[in-house]
């Protein structure tokens, strides 16, 4: 394969613009949290040590998942509605994610999920735009030109748009992907969590090797931007208490090794039925998508991730949840409050777009700000 097909990184203008965007957003956020809020951070030293170990790209052995930043998944219909927003969020390393309530292209198996899995994995992936078909430029595409983003270095989320494919670059192997497993705003006084979406299980079961996982618990953003706030809604509320607690890095072999082994056996059986006898990372057959064994593996994996976050929640002195709040079935009939998003029990459930159908569970959206 020709060297130019394996670029180390995007172009210098793209890297410079992306670094500026990330730094600007980071400084503004840090300024608000530490200058206009009462912020406490717990367990940060261990997390910073982990990040220090990952500075050398060549020395990385695993990807990293934080569930509470590096690459994030953002709602397509909110973050990528025009060229300005699309460019901003692309430079900010946000991957376009369709929400099933707003798009026929949403769901657990959309192309952005493939990109996230490959970012966490070892090698670069050149065939980034399959599936779906080879992309064509559209109004939803980033307006910031990159000489590498042609053909094999792009991917499409719907067959007509075009986005740079981050997993195609050498320096992005074993990347850091940051997710919100609840996938929506969930604001309730007792600080319980919703059920977690199955997208996190795809990242754990299909990435190669299994990424490091750090659970994080956050309290306070709901007070800064509560969904019941009145005018001016667009202004964050200052002087609120914010607490961020980093859990310990999970022993992924102990936590998920048995599930990954079962997935590997299933994957090998399915691969033997396709031409060439091999499936690329993040590519699934119908059996790997919908077979009962595959579904059961995703359920179990997701529940184990949720338990890891609950452990950090307990460290904050909060009581154990009612087990029912972690089940999808609990939320089948939600949404009868007097205002949009207000529930009968006084909690707030804001849909930046999830649906309950098990075959269309979406990845978390970076526009959501759940409590954990």
Image (tube, rainbow, N blue to C red):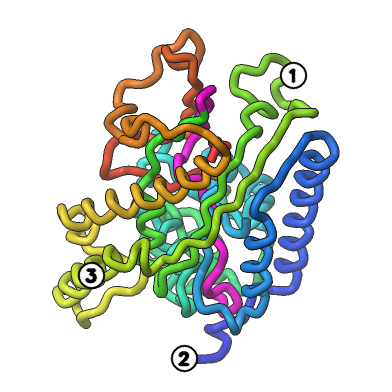
For the residue labelled by badge 1, is the local secondary structure a helix, a strand or a loop?
A: loop
Q: Residue at x 75, y 51 (%)?
A: 26
Q: Nearer the viewer, residue 210 or 235?
A: 210
Q: Residue 204 falls in which quadrant of the image?
A: bottom left
The picture places residue 225, in percent across and down from the top left corner, at 66, 28
Q: Residue at x 62, y 56 (%)?
A: 69
Crowd band around label 3 with a 10 angstrom C-alpha radius: few (<14), some (14–19), many (20+):
many
Query: Quick check: 239 above or below 150?
Result: above
Q: Gap between marks 1 and 3, in whole Å? A: 51 Å
Q: Residue 187 in magenta?
A: yes
Crowd band around label 1 with a 10 angstrom C-alpha radius: few (<14), some (14–19), many (20+):
few
Q: Nearer the viewer, residue 280 or 204?
A: 204
Crowd band around label 2 with a 10 angstrom C-alpha radius: few (<14), some (14–19), many (20+):
few
According to the picture, the residue beneath numbered tag 3 turns out to be 267
Q: Residue 221 in magenta?
A: no
According to the picture, the residue beneath numbered tag 1 turns out to be 232
For the residue labelled by badge 2, is the local secondary structure a helix, a strand or a loop?
A: loop
Q: Are marks 2 and 3 in contact (CB under 8 Å)?
A: no
- Can you tell which of label 2 and label 3 is closer to the viewer? 3
Q: Gap between marks 2 and 1, in whole Å? A: 56 Å
> Which comes before the other along the chain, label 2 or label 1?
2
Report the span colored magenta. Answer: 169-190
Q: Are marks 2 and 1 in contact (CB under 8 Å)?
A: no
Indicate left or right for 363 with 145 as reference. Answer: left
For the residue labelled by badge 3, is the local secondary structure a helix, a strand or a loop?
A: helix
According to the picture, the residue beneath numbered tag 2 turns out to be 1
Q: Residue 166 falls in which quadrant of the image?
A: bottom right
Query: Quick check: 167 above or below 300?
Result: below
- Can you tell which of label 2 and label 1 is closer to the viewer? 1
Q: Gap between marks 2 and 3, in whole Å? A: 27 Å
Q: Residue 277 falls in which quadrant of the image?
A: bottom left
Indicate left or right for 109 with 274 as reference. Answer: right
């Amino acid at each position: 394969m020709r060297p130019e097909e394996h670029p180390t990184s995007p172009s210098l203008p793209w890297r410079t613009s992306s670094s500026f965007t990330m730094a600007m957003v980071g400084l503004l956020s840090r300024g608000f949290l530490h200058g206009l809020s009462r912020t406490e951070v717990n367990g940060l030293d261990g997390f910073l040590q982990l990040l220090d170990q990952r500075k050398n790209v060549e020395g990385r052995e695993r990807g990293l998942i934080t569930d509470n930043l590096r690459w994030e998944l953002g709602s397509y219909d909110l973050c990528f509605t025009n060229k300005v927003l699309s460019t901003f969020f692309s430079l900010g390393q946000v991957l376009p994610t369709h929400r099933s309530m707003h798009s026929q292209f949403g769901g657990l198996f959309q192309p952005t999920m493939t990109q996230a899995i490959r970012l966490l994995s070892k090698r670069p992936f050149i065939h980034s735009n399959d599936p779906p078909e080879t992309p064509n430029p559209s109004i939803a595409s980033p307006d910031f030109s990159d000489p590498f983003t042609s053909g094999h270095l792009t991917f499409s989320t719907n067959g007509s748009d075009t986005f740079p494919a981050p997993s195609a670059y050498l320096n992005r192997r074993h990347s850091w992907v940051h997710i919100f497993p609840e996938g929506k705003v969930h604001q309730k006084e007792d600080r319980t969590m919703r059920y977690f979406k199955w997208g996190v299980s795809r990242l754990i079961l299909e990435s190669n090797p299994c990424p490091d996982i750090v659970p994080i618990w956050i309290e306070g953003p709901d007070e800064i931007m509560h969904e019941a706030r009145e005018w001016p809604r667009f202004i964050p509320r200052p002087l609120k208490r914010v607490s961020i607690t980093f859990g310990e890095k999970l022993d992924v072999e102990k936590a998920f090794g048995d599930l990954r082994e079962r997935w590997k056996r299933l994957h090998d059986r399915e691969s033997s039925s396709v031409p060439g006898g091999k499936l690329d990372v993040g590519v699934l057959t119908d059996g790997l998508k919908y077979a009962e064994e595959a579904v059961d593996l995703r359920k179990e994996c997701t529940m184990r991730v949720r338990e890891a976050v609950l452990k950090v929640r307990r460290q904050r002195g909060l009581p154990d949840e009612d087990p029912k709040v972690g089940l999808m079935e609990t939320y089948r009939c939600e949404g009868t409050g007097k205002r949009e998003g207000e529930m009968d029990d006084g909690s707030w459930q804001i849909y930046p777009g999830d649906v309950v159908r098990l075959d269309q569970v979406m990845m978390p959206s970076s526009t959501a700000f759940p409590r954990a």
